[in-house]
Image (cartoon, grey):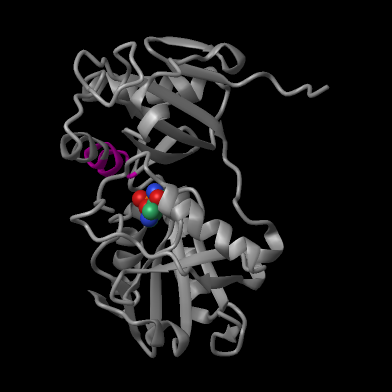
Amino acid sequence: MSTEPEPIIYVNGEFVRQSEARISVLDHAVLYGDGVFDTVVAWNGAIFELDAHVDRFFRSLAAVSLVSPVERGALVKLLGEAIARNGLHNAYVKWIATRGSNGTPLMDPKDCVPNLIIIARPYIHRFDETRRSQGIRLKTAAIRRPPGHVLDAHVKSLNYLNLVMAKLEAKAAGADEALLLDVHGRVCEAPGYNVFVLHGRQLKTPRRDILEGITRSTVMDIARQRGLEVEACDLELYHAYTSDELMLCSTAGGILSAVEIDGRRIASGVPGPVFQQIDQDYKTLLASGERSTQIVA
Ligand code: PMP
């Protein structure tokens, strides 16, 4: 039996043991993936880019016509409390607002009351040390990222099936992660990551049908400070195949180097110097607390 203490989850106004955390099976999050979320990391009790994440959460809510179950200040306090109650300092924290339930299994939002769930866990890496140091292998998914007028990728919604299918496809093919294109063949993002391609001193990232990641914007800042030319633009698969370096980034996953895509080696097949530099700068920035908000004593 595990000796780890049971995680404490916030749900509907209470902090409870994970095994006791409940929402209705008729919640529209369960029935339709109807809800939004966001994810932050905390280092030494300080949340990196807290305001940017909370702003994005409120934009996601507005976009799907949901009202936050709690106000901004209360939400921030609860995030801190979720970290503290789990005895954490370096944490991964995910919070979710669901549409709620009106007691029927019908797609009628009338009388639904949103639920708020907060999950705080010790920081864990999605990939093991070997993959992080040697780089990961990508596979372009046959399934495409939907255009914004079908399902808007700017919204961090609970509707992740498109990304989940891409991930399954990549895993079935023996790759580590999927790369999704849009319906026109332009590079979009990976399941849970934004993408960068490097050609010489030019670092480019897709500009549409993506979640505008907070790590993406941090990487853009770091790269500019390092004298790279940085641009958000349309990118074809060709640009990924011919890149000198290919990177993925996210709050929960950090920065990853991709060294293979669709069986093609990227440049020399090892994580490149620009990745090494940006990754180092990013870790230094996280540890410095410079863009972080202390919310746990
Ligand atoms: N794209 C998608 C689809 C994501 O789910 C995530 C993770 N939140 C990202 C990109 C990266 O965003 P961030 O850097 O804000 O974590």
Q: Say which quarter of the image contains residue 47.
A: top left
Quadrant of the rendering where the C terminus is positioned: top left
Residue furthest to the right: 1
| Residue sitting nearer the eye, 37 or 100 | 100
Q: Say which quarter of the image contains residue 137.
A: bottom right
* Residue 54 is inside the magenta segment: yes
Q: Say which quarter of the image contains residue 296.
A: top left
Where is 216 relative to 258, above or below? above
What is the magenta range? 49-56
Q: Residue at x 56, y 21 (%)?
A: 86
Q: Residue 161 at x, y = what percent?
A: 43, 48
Where is 270 relative to 205, above or below? below
Q: How many marks?
A: 0
Where is 195 relative to 282, above or below? below
Where is 15 relative to 158, above or below? above
Q: Residue at x 41, y 46 (%)?
A: 160
Q: Residue 143 at x, y = what percent?
A: 43, 64
Can the viewer see residue 294? no
